[in-house]
Image (cartoon, helix red, strand yellow):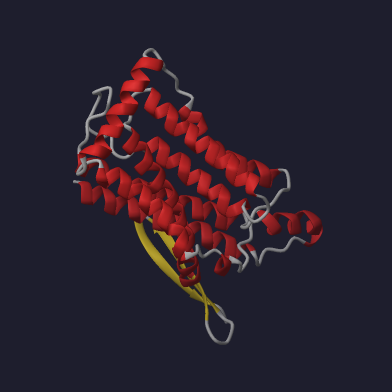
Amino acid sequence: MIYSSLHLTMKKILITLSCLISLGVNAQNIKDTTKKKLGDTLKKDVLTAPDTVKRLHSKPWTFIPPVALIAYGASSFIFHPVRNVDYFFEGEIRKTGPNFNTNAESYFLIGPVVIVYGLNLVGDLGKNRFIDRTALLGLSGGFLGISEYITKKTTHRLRPNGSDYLSFPSGHTGMAFMGAEFMAQEYSDKSFIYSAIGYTFAVTTGIFRMYNRDHWFSDVVAGAGYGVLSTKLSYLVYPYIRNWITHKDKNGKSTMIMPTYQDGVPGISFAKGL
């Protein structure tokens, strides 16, 4: 059942990415001579996918912190001192906020992503244009969703509030840190402030999850690691996916692979430029 769901999820993600990238490349050939200025503006940010993807690779050493966070969270299942830290924070939360309850984390976790698209809307452009940026975000979400789903089902940890056995890792925290790293990837070259804002949203989300007694401390730490790692992985592998879909041969002729859907039957079309 789990593997069938994962297979269907990955299939949907790949088809969606293919559509986004193919749309971006095809749009480069669209010209509107009667509205040239408007057409150029749209092609510049919304409809085009320029060849800047080769600059997206994450540096190898930057993968160490998120892996360390995941390792810390996982160690709580093995080492009693690490697990005792969970119990310590839970005890403190019971003392300082026994009646705390909020849904604010559901808004905080999407804050960094909303800010990224908002900044682009007002003209403060990030590293990537709309098509590539959206494909990267979707790929990050795919990595995060699949990895957290498998981990939650495998670890079977009871939440502090006893509601279910899907405590490890924190999904809300993972989403928040995925968005924070997404914002950092797009804007950290401009200013460190952008990264600080994104990660402030993410840390606040994790704190709310603990005070709502939905997660243990180690759940939140691991969730942060999963979120950051998922985004970094997407920025690492996406260039290869995009180049494979929009391949150009040695003569400069483009080869395009696109998903198709006709009469209820999914398929793949192949086109080569002349």
In this rendered view, identify the residue nearer to me: 224 or 262: 224
| Residue 267 appears in view | yes
Report whether 181 appears left or right of 187. left
Position in image of residue 117 (x %, y %): 62, 44
Relative placement, left or right, of 99 versus 181 is: left
Vertical side of 171 occupied by 107: above or below: above
Return the residue nearer the eye: 61 or 178.
Answer: 61
Residue that appears at 46% across and 29% down: 106
Q: Residue 257 in the image: state x and y as whole percent.
A: 46, 69
Location of the C terminus (image quadrant)? bottom right
Q: Is residue 10 above or below residue 168?
A: below
**Which residue of the protein is positioned furthest toward the top in this rendering?**
99
Q: Position of residue 22 (x, y in %)?
A: 53, 63
Above or below 95: residue 127: below
Given the current orientation, which residue lies at the most extreme bottom position? 251
Foreground pick, 221 / 265? 221
| Residue 110 in view (yes/no) | no
In percent of the image, x 71 and y 48: which residue is there? 124
Residue 174 percent location from the top left of the image: 41, 42
> In the rendered picture of this protein, how many numbered marks are placed on residues?
0
Residue 43 placement, left or right of 262: right
The quadrant where residue 49 appears: bottom right
Residue drawn 56% across the image and 78% down it? 273
- Which of the pair 19/232 is nearer the observer? 232
Residue at 49%, 32% in the rendered image: 204
